[in-house]
Each structure stands twice: as structure tokens, then as C-alpha cells.
Image (cartoon, rainbow, N blue to C red):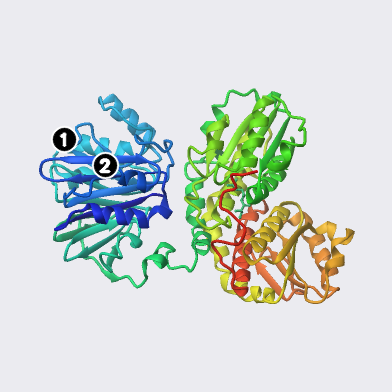
Amino acid sequence: MCGITGFTGKQPALPFLLQGLSKLEYRGYDSAGVTLVNSRKLKTWKAKGRLSELEKLLSRNLTQSCGIGHTRWATHGVPSNMNAHPHMNEEETISVVHNGIVENYASLKEELLAQGYHFQSDTDSEVIVQLLDSYYRRKPVMKDALMRTVKRLEGSYALCVTSIYEPNTIYVAKQESPMVLGRSEEGTFCASDAPALLEYTREILPLQDGQFAILNKDSLEVFDAKGKTVIPQWIHFPYDVQAAQKNGYDSFMMKEIHEQPSVIRETLRGRFHGSRVVLPIIDQLDVDWTTIHQTIFIACGTAYHACVYADILYRRYTGGLSSVIPASEFRYSNPAVDEHTLCVFVSQSGETADTLAALKLAKARGCVTIAVVNVLGSSIARQTDAVLYTAAGPEIAVASTKAYTTQLVLLHVLVLKLAELLQHRVRGITRIIADLKRLPEITEQALETEPEVKKLAHMLKDKNDAYFIGRQLDYPTALEGALKLKEISYVHADAYYAGELKHGPIALIEQDTVVTAIATQPEVCGKTISNIKETVARGANVILITNPDTDAKEFKYVVRIPEVTPELAAIPSAVILQLFAYYGAKEKGCDIDKPRNLAKSVTVE
Ligand code: AGP
């Protein structure tokens, strides 16, 4: 997820480009760059780090009136000057910025290297400008060259092209990644998202998949995938910048809850070949898997809950020995680990001090280490033997939502791969992989429960305690549901194994106590239901989260997850509990995105 801006008009382009990128830093901020072009020259400036690092390179008297800009969230190639966008061809006559993932970049790069092209960066995006150059050389018509280039791209893109050949023109193409256009008396604009445009124009035009656009100083044309002119349907954008950055939602958390279908799709992209899991980075590990005797999942907070989920799956899929330990405990527990141990570290930020400390100990003991992180090139990513990246994009809200569900998804894929490497056949793998591929739609359906979940959250208005219970794969969901509610509503929420209630915690249940029970696992659903009845008998208000076919007529408050294989029920269940926590916090008038006492990344122990 990156931020793109482009302008061509009667004014210098730089002020628009930079203010637009600053409004889009929530889409990515590990490096940035701009290209400015006039009839004599095309020049590019790039810098690693925040936008302010780029601004230090730019003098304010750069008056070129056409340019493109980019703020990056690295997916291929660590954050660096060379990997920052824009990318130029070797003659520095064409410049491109790109947001998305070119899945087939490796084969395209090979083809271009064979033609004598050289590459500066490790990114997938650089193949776009070189491919464009190769087509432009054959027929110097940029529109044709761009149409031929994007036809070769597999994956997602929103891209802008500018060149010395047409110094007042910007070419735009869009497939899956967002791109909106704008116009005013001053010129024409493009950007990844509306916030970048709103100080210059309220007239915007979201490009549709497969469409192209050609922006000139006082004209803008839109074409469909066949190059046929499209009559633009301009709209007046009602939101202010703040609201637009949240895509119209009232908080980044709610925006990020609703991003989950798309970021789960991105995280799963390229991970399957038919019914087989494809994780080359794990296949390439120099490990004799017959010598791995145990696997330990290690993380903190929400990432720890994802590890609880992965630990249960690991034992179920591989029949092997596994455990899960909070990172803050691992290093002090004198763990019995060695070169026969695989340690899997999970972290959204990749910078959590406790997790880094645990990783250091694991490496000192000779363990094989794998990381599942969301930030490319982060400390944990750099220090493990192999790293898998979730594609959640920047998560701004302190309370983790989309990072969690993408961790669940990627850990699920990793455990399937480990089962294959440990030569253990996974029962029902075809059904599981089919539903993994359906997860974006399943998550979309889970979001449709929002109105009923919002009503149920009223129960929390005058409550200071709430309990979440579950068994087996429902237990990590209970843990995460309790943490979400605690974090943003400050309600004292606890999670228990459903079977553990009667061994003490049921003493806490009194009239109208709110108990959320998650019962999606067929083999223990009936048991959980009977545990719930024990709380109902003592006056609890029970919210049951369960499958479409569960007999729940005895329960007043039931939220049903979409039809899904039990091993993946944790994802839609988590979405429902995120909504529950969100509306619980709204009931309490709490600050949703910045809850008290919490930081987004805990870089101290
Ligand atoms: C989750 O909502 C919290 N923000 C927190 O528990 C977080 O998951 C934990 O600090 C771990 O952070 P990490 O994933 O960046 O390592």
C-alpha cells in the first residue's frame, strides 16, 4: 500500500506533490521520491525515511509544472534510496511510480535482462518502467506502450508515467490498487486517495479497474482497457481531509476493520499453486526437517493470540510437538531449545523489544528461526533465517485488527507448508485451501453483521466487566476479543477456556454479566453450549458467536459467522469481536485510535 501523487498544469507541480504525499503517509512512509519534468530535462529525487527526508533534498524554486510523487510501504526490496520510487529507465527519459504487487516480476525481469536491460533496485515495480521503455523504443507512442506494458503485468497496480518526450503529460493506469483523478482551473491531478486532492479540488473521478487516463495541463481523457474513450462521471467529494484519510470512517480502526477483505486477499496473493501451498522462502531454508523435534511460536499481545491459533493448528496438521510462549517470558524461562527447534516469531511492527530479545536467545541456542511480520526490512525481519510478510499495509490504530487476521491467514499457510515439509498429510487440505481462497468473501460477509453487533454492544454501556469463553480454536478468538475490548473501552475483559469456567471463574458471574461465547468448532460446540447454560442459569447475558447451522434457539443473542471450514472460523469470528469492541468503546465515549496508556509499537521491555 503506497501513496502516489501527480500534477500537470499552470503552476509549479512540487507543492501539490509534497502536500499530497504528506496526506497519504498513512498509506506508507518508509521512503519517498518525486520526478519533475520540463521540455529540457526529467529529474528525480528520492530518500529513505519519512517525507521530511525527501524535502531536505528539494529547493523550493523548482518550478517545473509537471511531476509525479510516491511515498512507499515496501513489499519487495527493503526501504532504501534505490528501492524508493519513482523508477526511471536507463536513459532517464521515462519515470514511473507504482502502487501494488507485480506477481510475475521475476519472469519479466529475466526477459528484460536477456534484452540487455540493467536494474538498479530490488523492487518488483522497476520492471514496469523497463518494460515500458522496451515497448516505447519499438513504437514511440506512450499510450500504446503503456497498454502493452500493463497487459504483461499479473497482480495489482495503480501507476503514473511521465517522460521527457511529452513533458506536460502524465499517463495513468489502474488495476485493483486505487487511483483518483482531479481537475481545476490550475490543471489536472491524480492520487492514490482523495485526501491528497482536497486542498486543490473537490471534483474527483475514481478510476475503475482496467481504465487508463491521459492528463494534460487543461485536458484529461479516460480510456477503457481497449483504448476506447470513456465519458468521465465527475463527482463532488463531500469529506474534509481528515475524514477522507479515514475513507469516510470516523476512526482508522474502523477503516482498518473494513480493509480486512482486501488485505487478506493481498496476503494470500501468490501463496497457492492449485491445491498446493507455495512458500519458496521456506522451501529454500537449508534445514533437514527430519531433525526438527519441536516448534515454538513466540510473540506479544495480539500477535501472541495469533500464535495460540497457529500452535493448535500445528499439532493438528503435523502431529508434531509445539508450544506457544509470550516473548516476554521466553527469555527468562530457560527454554529447552536448540538446533532441533524451530522458533516462529510473529510481530506486526517487527520492532517489539520483547520479541527481539526472545529472537536473540533463540539464535544464540542455534534454533531455526522464521518471522511473520508486516513491516518489510524491520529488525525482526532482518534477523531471522526466513521471513514471511503479511500485506496488511500500515496499521495506524493502536488496536490491531487487520494485522491480526492477516497473521492468522499467513500462519495458517505456513503451518500447511510445515506439514508438507514434515511429510504429514493434512486431512481435508483441499477443503481448507478452497476456503482460504474464499476468505476475502467470507470476511466481507462477517462485516455484514455490523448492525446486529452494534446493537449488542449496548449491553456494555454500564458494564465494567465482560468475559469471553471458547475451546480449542475458539480460545485464541476469546483471548483476542477480550484484549480488543480491554484496549479501547477499558472494560475489564477476561478470556477463559470454556471448560475452565466451572473451576473458579464462574464465581464472577452474576445478574446481567456479559459473557461472549465463541462456539464454532464442531467437536466441542456442544460442550461449550452446555458451559454457557451454566452462566445463563446464574443470570448472565450471553452472546453466542457460532456457525450458521448451530441449534441456538435457547439463546437470545446469537451472531452467526458465514459458512466456513472450522479451521478458518477464527477469522470471521475475530472480525465480529473487533466490531463488538469498537462499538463497546463508542458506548463509553473512548478515544478509538489512541487508547490511554498504549503505544502502537512497544520498543521497550
Ligand atoms: C494489539 O492490539 C496491541 N497493539 C498489542 O498487543 C500488539 O499486538 C503487541 O504489542 C505486539 O506488537 P507487534 O505485533 O508489533 O510485535
Looking at the image, which is closer to me, 33 or 293? Answer: 33
Q: Residue 517: name its quadrant.
A: bottom right
**Regarding mark 1 in the picture, which secondary structure is present there?**
helix
Q: Residue at x 71, y 52 (%)?
A: 473
* Position in image of residue 542 (x %, y %): 75, 71
Q: CA distance from mark 1 to mark 2?
A: 12 Å
**Regarding mark 2 in the picture, which secondary structure is present there?**
helix
Residues at badges 1 and 2 in contact (C-beta under 8 Å)? no
Which amino acid does the dot numbered 2 rest on? Thr
Q: Residue 317: name its quadrant.
A: top right
* Position in image of residue 596 (x %, y %): 61, 62
Mark 2 closeness class: few <14, some 14–19, many ≥20 residues within 10 Å: many
Q: Is residue 422 visible?
A: no
Looking at the image, which is closer to me, 6 or 44? Answer: 44
Q: How many marks?
A: 2
Left or right of residue 582: residue 37: left
Left or right of residue 242: residue 205: left
The residue carrying mark 2 is 149
The label on residue 162 is none
Which amino acid does the dot numbered 1 rest on? Arg
The label on residue 138 is 1
